[in-house]
Amino acid sequence: MQYEGVLKKMQTEIGHPIQYYMLFESDFLNVNQVLDKNLKIEFIKFQCLNCGNDRPIYRQGFCKTCFFEIPSAGDWIMRPELSTAHLDQEDRDLAYEKKVQLQPHIVYLANSSNVKVGVTRKGQIPTRWIDQGAHEAIEIVEVPNRYLAGITEVALKNHVGDKTNWRTMLTNNIVDENLLEWREKLKQYIPEEALPYYLDNKSETQIEFPVLKYPTKVKSLNLDKTPLYEGKLKGIKGQYLIFEDNTVFNIRGSEGYYVGLTVN
């Protein structure tokens, strides 16, 4: 089987385990069906996810020009506390920013390598947790805009992590945590403006990933340095493909790379 197209974040579907899909312009691949098969990845060219041009990818699947111009790559994406649409203040495109920022957002706890706090739009639950490789997660607050979620995250990350150790996540060297207890412990640090939105009726969500074998020591595949790679696929976790020789490939980190895939 052969596929060709630009890499984008894998789409997921709830199941036991999670189902993963690579979507291309005129085809798709259920990646779960490739487990225990050889997968060859060949880099062909760049294709910016915004302009479509063959320019080196700078960040988030965009070329450098697009990254610094388009509204979907504004600083408030990575730093929700910088959101200003609720004040009617524009960053790059107020209509776009209102559409994204002025909707319900969730502040959550997720355990992928350790317990961490994060923010996402309500409609992205549980997709966001799956993308981070979290095997368990729980909601803390549901607020009406991105700014309130952002200031809540900033307040809580003084008392809990806000980063995932991707190597620990991929080797599965993790322990279960009682996220209900963590949520209750952190409640006292929630900003006053967000406290009315505290969720005390949500239970932990458990997530099962399709992994046959975890790597013992991960080696990251970089298509810039290794434009052609072939290996036996042994698992999918977060947005990573895990291969038998301990190589891991971050699909999300390679968005905008146009590749050929061969399954045999």
Image (cartoon, helix red, strand yellow):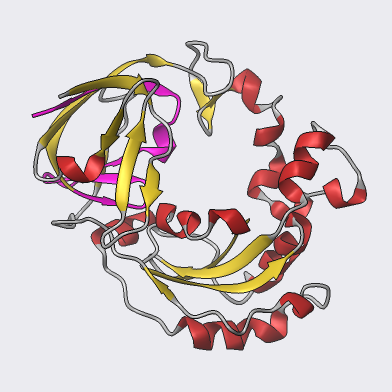
Q: Is residue 119 above or below residue 245?
A: below
Expressed as whole percent of the image width and height from the top left, the position of residue 112 reads 39, 65
Image-quadrant location for residue 162 = bottom right
Given the current orientation, which residue lies at the most extreme right position? Answer: 88
Task: From the viewer's perspective, tell me whether residue 221 is left or right of residue 98.
Answer: left
Which of the two residues, 178 or 79, is positioned nearer the viewer here? 178
Does the image show residue 141?
yes
Report the residue at 52% width, 24% height from top: 49
Image-quadrant location for residue 253 = top left
Does the image show residue 259?
no
Given the current orientation, which residue lies at the most extreme top position? Answer: 54
Image-quadrant location for residue 45 = top left
Whether the magenta-drawn stretch holds residue 21 is answered as no
Expressed as whole percent of the image width and height from the top left, the position of residue 150 reads 71, 60
Task: From the viewer's perspective, tell me whether residue 140 is left or right of residue 130.
Answer: right
Task: From the viewer's perspective, tell me whether residue 3 is left or right of residue 206.
Answer: left
Instruction: Point out the image quarter for the C terminus.
Output: top left
Q: Is residue 13 above or below residue 258?
A: below
Q: Is residue 141 above or below residue 40?
A: below
Q: How many tags in the picture?
A: 0
Task: From the viewer's perspective, tell me whether residue 43 is left or right of residue 264.
Answer: right
Q: Main secondary structure of the magenta part?
A: strand
Instruction: Point out the image quarter for the N terminus.
Output: top left
Report the residue at 14% width, 57% height from top: 213
Whether the magenta-drawn stretch holds residue 251 is answered as yes
Expressed as whole percent of the image width and height from the top left, the position of residue 103 reads 73, 54
Expressed as whole percent of the image width and height from the top left, the position of residue 247 reads 20, 42
Report the residue at 48% width, 60% height from top: 126
Report the residue at 18% width, 57% height from top: 214
Write the start and end of the magenta stretch as one range: 235-264
Which of the two residues, 24 or 45, is positioned nearer the viewer here? 24
